[in-house]
Amino acid sequence: VDEWGVMWKEGRVTGHPLEKSWLLAKNYKVPDPYAPGRFDKAKEIMKENKDKYHLGLVWFTLFERLWMLRGFNNMLIDPYTNFEEFTVLRDKIMDFNLGLIEQWLNLGVDGIFISDDWGGQQKLLVSLDYWRKFYKPCYKEMFDLIHAGGADVWMHSCGNVTELIPDLIELKLDVLNPVQPQSINIEYISKEYRDKLCFFGGVDVQGTLPHGTLNDVRREVKHLIQTLGGKDGGYIGGTSHTILPDTPLENIKALFQAFYDYCSCTDLD
């Protein structure tokens, strides 16, 4: 059970503390973002790595935090059936997030990484209007605060989030992760958005990495660098999500070697 009262088992959420009734949420107190010791490890790591790019995390940022508390089905309909209660809980979580962001900025991080999975394998989990009405203003507030503090905004959102990209660019998102090639059309997002956003990820953990040959892995890495990157950057090498346990070790080695080789050369042709 984490500090939010959410129950976990083997890396998956199995219990939602506010699922049964909004009465449980009435007196619910979110964790203290200013709790003593919360950033002790971060301070230690930053002190030992002064020459590195420092990236702070505000993970399970908003939508995910809400459904972890209320249950996924509840959270999809709460804005329509319990708008006042939904707003109060959402804003409590936002206060927590803004507190974390403020402290990361005070530590001097270079970027802040938030996460909310909005995409399914084929399309968004919700309508674009739903996202714009109930969540977009919250992201604007967080993005603006991060940028005002001189840091970059990174966002993790799984699945096909192509519909969200124009809005995220409008909000001045800097880096989008994880770019799943079986969900998102890599050529399309390159053509439309390559000069407006940095993409992070892309190597297929659903197909190429676990099931492809060594040459397949190398070809995909090269294609991603050529398609999403440019002479001035615009692409951060990585996978489309966590590398799964059935992935051959040799393919993982080939992945790292390919990024090392192709990111070090001046001519990919």
Image (spheres, rainbow, N blue to C red):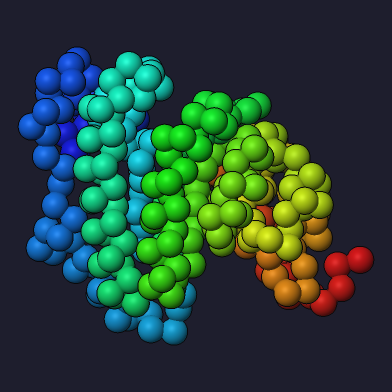
Position of 99 with respect to 227 (left or right) is left
Quarter of the view holding residue 123: top right
Front in this rendered view, residue 147 or 245: 147
**Callout count:** 0
Residue 105 visible in the snapshot: yes
Position of 180 with respect to 51 (left or right) is right
Q: Quadrant of the C terminus?
A: bottom right
Front in this rendered view, residue 204 or 155: 155
Position of 201 with respect to 74 (left or right) is right
Indicate whether 227 appears above or below 151: above
For the point 23% across and 27% down, which residue is it? 85
Q: Position of residue 109 (x, y in %)?
A: 38, 73
Q: Position of residue 82 (x, y in %)?
A: 28, 20
Q: Position of residue 246 (x, y in %)?
A: 56, 35
For the point 46% across and 43% down, which residue is it? 136
For the point 15% across and 28% down, which residue is it? 25
For the point 67% across and 34% down, which residue is it? 183
Residue 13 visible in the snapshot: no
Indicate whether 18 appears above or below 103: above
Q: Residue furthest right?
A: 269
Q: Position of residue 196 (x, y in %)?
A: 68, 61
Q: Quadrant of the N terminus?
A: top left
Position of 266 with respect to 150 (left or right) is right
Front in this rendered view, residue 47 or 116: 116
